[in-house]
Image: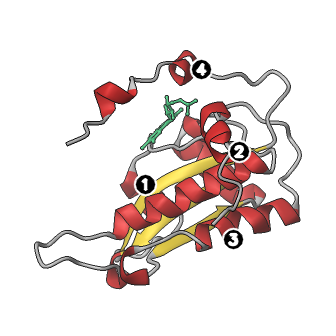
Amino acid sequence: MTKDTESTAFLDMTRERWSVRRFAPEQIREEHMRRILEAGRNAPSACNYQPQRVLVLQSDEAIAAVRSITHWAFNAPTVLLVCANLAESWKNADGADSAEVDAAIALDHMMMEAWECGVGSTWVRGFDERVVRRAFNIPSTWKIVAMMPMGYPADSAKPSNWHFRRKSIEELCQVL
Ligand SMILES: Cc1cc2nc3c(=O)[nH]c(=O)nc-3n(C[C@H](O)[C@H](O)[C@H](O)COP(=O)(O)O)c2cc1C
């Protein structure tokens, strides 16, 4: 835990980060990719079962395939396809399966570390899960959680209007 309790570096990043939807053509540098994947690895998961599974789509073939499936892949040079292995996730006695939550936390960690590396990204669920499953041979025991197109932002990239619309803390939270 940081000893600098005055630091707002992370809070500032949560405020400043926005969904990047237009990318420069250059591929993400290896050291940045390693840091991003490491952040996903460091994410907490229920009972530490770590069910997240990440496909890093970068080959010409994989990128062409993902772009043919969804226009939300934009022109990103890399697309993460994040899944949750239902055979390795924690299930509560009430039947709740933590798989998707665990994978989402890992993806959020990766999104924030990407921003720290100067790599932009957008969380994407605008695709047909059945089509993605067929295209990338995703096992039936894996839930497909999200895609994350990513890369260095194009000079012309800018936040959408949605980025600036945040509900107030009072609308979102109650102190009981
Ligand atoms: C679960 C989820 C699904 C999303 N799906 C899409 C999507 O399919 N296409 C897209 O352009 N953005 C998608 N987004 C991004 C949101 O539109 C974006 O985060 C929101 O409008 C706030 O903007 P900001 O991220 O720039 O602050 C998704 C975000 C989440 C968390």
Answer with left or right where residue 57 lies relative to residue 176.
right
Which numbered disc, 3 or 4, marks the residue closer to the eye?
Answer: 3
Where does label 4 land, which residue?
A: 160
Foreground of the two, 19 or 141: 19
Amino acid of disc 3: Glu
Where does label 1 land, which residue?
A: 131
**Mark 1 vs mark 4: which is more N-terminal?**
1
**Mark 3 vs mark 4: which is more N-terminal?**
3
Q: Kindly give the residue lying farthest to the left in the view shown.
A: 94
**x then y, percent, for residue 81:** 55, 59
State how far apart marks 2 and 1 are (Cα). 40 Å
Foreground of the two, 150 or 117: 117
**Mark 2 vs mark 4: which is more N-terminal?**
2
Quadrant where the C terminus sits is top left
Where does label 3 land, which residue?
A: 38
Tell me which corner region of the image, top left, top right, bottom left or bottom right, holds residue 122: top right
Amino acid of disc 4: Ser
Where does label 2 land, which residue?
A: 9
Q: Secondary structure at mark 2?
A: helix
